Image: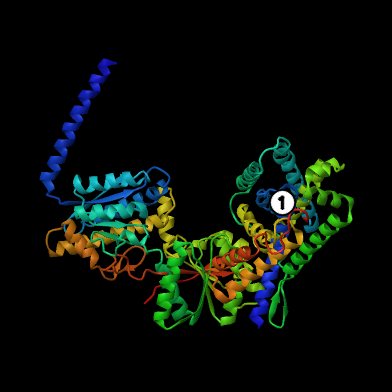
Amino acid sequence: MELFIQQLVSGISIGAIYSLLAVGYALVYSVYNFTNWAFDGFMAFGAFMGFTAITSLFMPFWLAALFSIILTVILSVGTEKLAYSPLRVRKAPRLFMMISAMGVNLATVNIINLIYGGVFRKFPVENLQPIFIEGVSIGRMDLMAGGISFGVLALLWVFLYRTKWGLGIRASSIDILTASLMGINNSGVAIVVFAITGVLSSVAGVFYGIKYAVFPMMGIVTIKAMIASIVGGLGSLPAAILGSMILGILETLVSGYISSTYRDLFSFMFLIVILLFFPNGLMGKSSDEKL
Amino acid sequence: MNKSAQFFRKWLFLLVIGVLLVSSLSGCGSQEKVLKVGYITEQTGVDAYVGAASIPAMQDYVDEVNAKGGVGGYKLELVVYDTRSEVPDAVTVAKRLMDQDKAVAIIGPSWSSAGIPLADIADAAKVPMIGTTASNVNVTVAEDGTLHPYMFRVCFIDPYQGFAQADFAYNKLGLRKAAFLTDIASPYTVGLHQFFEDHFIELGGEIVANEGYTQGDAEFRAQLAKIKDTGADLLVVDAYTFKDVGLAAQQAEALGMDIQIMAGDGVFVPELLEMAGPQLEGAIVTTGVSDIAPEFAEFNKAFEAKHGTQASIYTYYGLDALMAIEYAIGEAAKKGEVTPTAVRDALETMTDVQLFTSKVTMEPDTHNPHNKPLLIMTIKDSQWELTETFQPE
């Protein structure tokens, strides 16, 4: 039982990180109908900015986190302005947007690699000792990461459902053209959406860096988040969180009780089965109601 | 211009005649018998440091042997050719040593991708070769399991370390319940794991958990929680990248695990200590011959003073191979004529012969040195500490 609870706790903490990333994918997908592959690079960028702020600029952690968020938002919005928006304006097929995103991703990761080198670095923060409850270890870092993840997601929910801007984004996610005819500022929505994406990837990057290590290829984990958001149901925020939790817990339970060697094999086969029964994902909706 | 060219040609002609005369005279005069020992190594190309660290030491040693009167009535001559760090060049120069120079034995190559094709060539030419640092299993034993009769090596094969680790863990540390965390996609890791597991079970130990991951994974808590639950007293993480060991140690600590961690030379890098020094306190990392071993300190100093370059494992293994050949020539001379085949036979049966790094017994069925010593590095206060040199019984 103790082992089961331990695995569950680990699974939830992994799911919390996936959630941040999955929501970022879901947000862009629901408004612009393409997968923002550049997310991978943004996450690594966020982590490296936080790392640099602490090691080279000697900032305290909270300031470094803010520094990372601001720079990642600039990168994300800049990418939208330079790489995505021109394609949308010229009515390029959506596939081209994804290729463009992959290009941005490769460029970001490679530039980081050139500047910092491919080594693994420890994120320079104090290692917090875990709390033990009845022999089950709960990482303080995990609690913090989980808390902040859900805090950020809650803020996002409030923003989307309780503000005028949020209404604009939701309207755009249903039909971006009609929304603009109704007076919603398209480019304003784009900036807000990509700014949110920047915040999410920076927070995820910094937490991932603290929990594991900072390295240029760290963003590879976003592929799991992408899968989680599809399983949950692409284009819906709660679905992305649900998908992430399922994937995180599934992975740990498969590792713990079936086989860690075949973890990915079993987890992803299970996900395929889910998709066979729920082709739109667990909470997938038809296109008239999104986010 | 023309005149000076003529002048040069004349001198060159005289010089050649002179050299021929002198060499024939010396040949007649002393009746000295000379055996050529070939050495193919990297003098240029990306791995030029290999030759730079080994040739001077080996030439010194040959001079020393000759000054003492040679071996078995023969003087030795070291014939060095450059492989330019390329496989085709290594093959060309090895053939030249076999066919033209009639070398009695050849030292090299230092890397496995050259060692594998050269093994067939050595077999065909019937000239023994001793690889220095070529550690892939298939250098001496072909993939179908047949032995290359003329190919030997003085370093240990990659997975041997797993065998020696198991021996150390069982016999020296008294550990009985081992758990693995293995990168299932890395041949290095899987090889070490297999040898560890086989030998540990053979000794009487128990494998309580066999956990895996794939390269790029950063999350091991599921596997570690399971290992904790089995009550294992040893965690073997023979990873190829230090990140895996660092993360495993951090997460094991977070789970409140108190377990002996052991890893192989793949992670013997300073970055590991920066990443997880405190979490790895007491962890053991094993490695093969290393220039940090105290028994080489004096040699290293003298070598650097004389040649201006630092000694490295290539120096040591080059000398090991040379000393093995010296021994084999001596043995062959006792029995009769020293031919490449006679040298090969002596190499195959060498038992407890003191070479440069250690005493070596050649395994006749694999042509690998038997039970080479292993350096045991323990992490203390986030520093490497060489705790002992361990030789499996």
* Residue lying at 29% horizontally and 69% vertically, measured from the top left: B361
Extreme residue toward the top, this view: B2
Does A133 sit above or below residue A39?
below
- In this view, A116 is above or below A208: above
Mark 1 residue crowding within 10 angstroms, few (<14) / some (14–19) / many (20+): some
Q: Nearer the viewer, residue A220 or A274?
A: A274
Instruction: Return the x and y of residue A281 as percentages of the image width and height.
Output: 67, 61
Residue name at image x 66 percent, y 40 percent: A93
Quadrant placement of the C terminus of chain B: bottom left
- Amino acid type at circle 1 is Tyr
Using residue A13 as the reference point, say whether residue B392 is left or right of it: left
Q: Is residue A107 left or right of residue B377?
A: right
Q: Could you say where residue A169 lies in the image, as x and y percent from the top left?
A: 82, 49
Residue B298 placement (x, y as % from top left): 42, 60
Task: Report whether residue B82 is seen.
Answer: no
Tell which subunit mark 1 falls on. Answer: A
Where disc 1 sits, the SS reads helix
Residue that appears at 20% across and 31% down? B15
Which of the 4 quarters of the picture holds residue A202?
bottom right
Residue A196 position, x and y percent, is 78, 51
Q: Which residue is mark 1?
A: A29
Q: Nearer the viewer, residue B210 or B368?
A: B210
Residue in front for this viewpoint, A20 or B246: A20
